C-alpha cells in the first residue's frame, strides 16, 4: 500500500514481518515506522495502516486496537477498537477521525466512522439480513475525502458513497 501525504510517501509492506517505510517526495528513505515485536510500543501484526494528510502520524490497525506512531517511527499511543467491528481496513477522514471497514461476514456493520480517539460516531451498511453465503468475494476497501466516504460493496456489486453530514448513501 502506498500512502502519500504532505511530508512524503509511506510504503506498507504486508509480508510475513509487516513494515512501514517513510520516504520524502524525491524517494529518499527517511525512516522505518514502528518496530515489530510484542511490547506495548511495538506492533505484532498489521491489518492496515493510514496516515493523516499532514503526515505527522501513522496508524497501525491491529485486531482490537490501533497503535499510533509519529512520522519518525516513535510510538505515541494506542486505542482499543471494539471487537464487534472486526475492521480490516482503515482510512483517515477529512473530519479528523477515521473510517473503518470490515470483511468479516458476522459484523453488524461493514463501514463505521469514529473520532480521533476511535469512539464510534456512525455505522453504515447493516449486514443483517444479507445472504452472505451467496457472496463469492467480500472485500471493502474504503476512501474518504471532502466529507464523503467511498467504499466497494461486493454484496451488491456496487460502489457506494456516504455523505458524512447527512448519513445518506448513494450507490
Image (cartoon, rainbow, N blue to C red):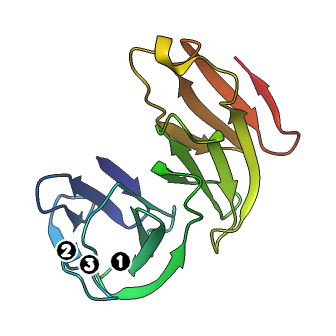
The residue indicated by pointer 3 is 34
The residue indicated by pointer 1 is 71
Give residue 124's position: percent from left, percent from top. 72, 39
| Residue 10 falls in image quadrant | bottom left
Q: Residue at x 54, y 44 (%)?
A: 101
SS of the residue under disc 1 = loop
Whether residue 137 sits left or right of residue 132 in the image: it is: left
Give residue 116's position: percent from left, percent from top. 65, 71
* Residue depth check, mark 3 versus mark 1: number of the one nearer the observer: 3
Give the answer, above or below, for where 60 lies relative to 132. Answer: below
Q: CA distance from mark 2 to mark 3?
A: 13 Å
Q: CA distance from mark 2 to mark 1?
A: 9 Å
* Residue depth check, mark 2 versus mark 3: number of the one nearer the observer: 3
How crowded pointer 3 is (Cα within 10 Å; few <14, some 14-19, many 20+) is rated as many
Observer-nearest residue: 5 or 152? Answer: 152
Observer-nearest residue: 170 or 30? Answer: 170
Amino acid at each position: 500500500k502506498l500512502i502519500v501525504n504532505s511530508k512524503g510517501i509511506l510504503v506498507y509492506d504486508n509480508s510475513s514481518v509487516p513494515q512501514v517505510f517513510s520516504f520524502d517526495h524525491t524517494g529518499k528513505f527517511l525512516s522505518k515506522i514502528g518496530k515489530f515485536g510484542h511490547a506495548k510500543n511495538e506492533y505484532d501484526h498489521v491489518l492496515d495502516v493510514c496516515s493523516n494528510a499532514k503526515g505527522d502520524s501513522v496508524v497501525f490497525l491491529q485486531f482490537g486496537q490501533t497503535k499510533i506512531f509519529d512520522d519518525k517511527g516513535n510510538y505515541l499511543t494506542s486505542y482499543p477498537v471494539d471487537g464487534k467491528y472486526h475492521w480490516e481496513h482503515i482510512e483517515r477522514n477529512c473530519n479528523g477521525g477515521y473510517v473503518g471497514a470490515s470483511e468479516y461476514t458476522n459484523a453488524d456493520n461493514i463501514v463505521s466512522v469514529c473520532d480521533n480517539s476511535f469512539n464510534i460516531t456512525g455505522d453504515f451498511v447493516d449486514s443483517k439480513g444479507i445472504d452472505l453465503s451467496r457472496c463469492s468475494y467480500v472485500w471493502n476497501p474504503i476512501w474518504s475525502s471532502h466529507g464523503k466516504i467511498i467504499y466497494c460493496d461486493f454484496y451488491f456489486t456496487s460502489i457506494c458513497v456516504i455523505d458524512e453530514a447527512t448519513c445518506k448513501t448513494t450507490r
